[in-house]
Image (cartoon, grey):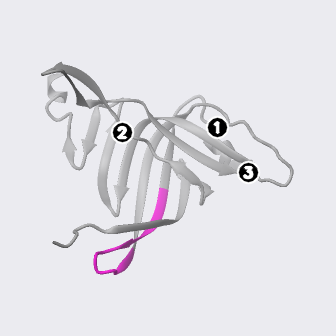
Amino acid sequence: MATAFDYNGPVLANTCYVDGQLVARDVSMTLPEIAFETFDVNASGTVSLPVPTRTDDMEFAITKIGEDLGLLKLAGAADGAITIEARWAKDVHDRLGKAKTEGAKAFMRAIPKGFPGIELEPGEAAENEMTFAVLRYQLFINGVEYCCIDKLNHICRIKGKDFYQKVNPLI
């Protein structure tokens, strides 16, 4: 039986925007992980089961080269949340070897966890990593929504399934 999935190639390029303004291009970014809180059930031992309406903290990280206005724009919201948009393109090959380029976008509402320490070394470009506490995270790949997690507004939608659909009317 032939495989029915595509083979993803490398990221070709990426960009990062803060409140609609370009702040970085071709940088290292780590999007949030979605980890559900769990509870234990005694069943011939212990089984930890996920609670899909409750997620652990989400974090976004970006490593930017140099000190510029983009870094300042990323760090400038220590008093409130900013809107971050990450975009990237990658090559994808189907099972017949036909290649196409796909795009992806991630939208986040986030608060910087601090201002990066700037490491200075002669002959080397400074790499500045910033981390953010993410309040809302929405991921689209090739135009399809994969997930939308909004911790403050009780939204948890993964692969089109709304985990709060039965909960919200009751609270």
Left or right: where does residue 99 sit relative to residue 47?
Answer: right
State which tag comes first along the sequence, 3 or 1. 3
- Measured as percent of width and height from the top left, residue 141 is found at 35, 59
The residue wearing badge 3 is 66
Q: Nearer the viewer, mark 3 or mark 2?
A: 2
- Measured as percent of width and height from the top left, residue 137 is found at 39, 42
In the depicted structure, whether residue 144 falls above or below residue 111: below
Magenta highlight on residue 163: no
Q: Provide the secondary structure element on which disc 1 rests.
A: loop
Q: Provide the secondary structure element on which disc 3 rests.
A: loop
Measuring 28% from the left and 75% from the top, which residue is drawn there? 95
Measuring 48% from the left and 51% from the top, which residue is drawn there? 85
The residue wearing badge 1 is 76
Q: Is 80 in front, or is 4?
A: 4
Q: CA distance from mark 3 to mark 2?
A: 30 Å
* Res. 37 image quadrant: top left
The residue wearing badge 2 is 34
Q: What residue span does the magenta drawing correspond to?
A: 87-100
Q: Amino acid at mark 1?
A: Gly
State which tag comes first along the sequence, 3 or 2. 2
- Measured as percent of width and height from the top left, residue 77 is found at 60, 35
Left or right: where does residue 72 sit relative to residue 19?
Answer: right
Q: CA distance from mark 1 to mark 2?
A: 26 Å
Q: Amino acid at mark 3?
A: Gly
Q: Nearer the viewer, mark 1 or mark 2?
A: 2
Measuring 41% from the left and 65% from the top, which residue is drawn there? 103
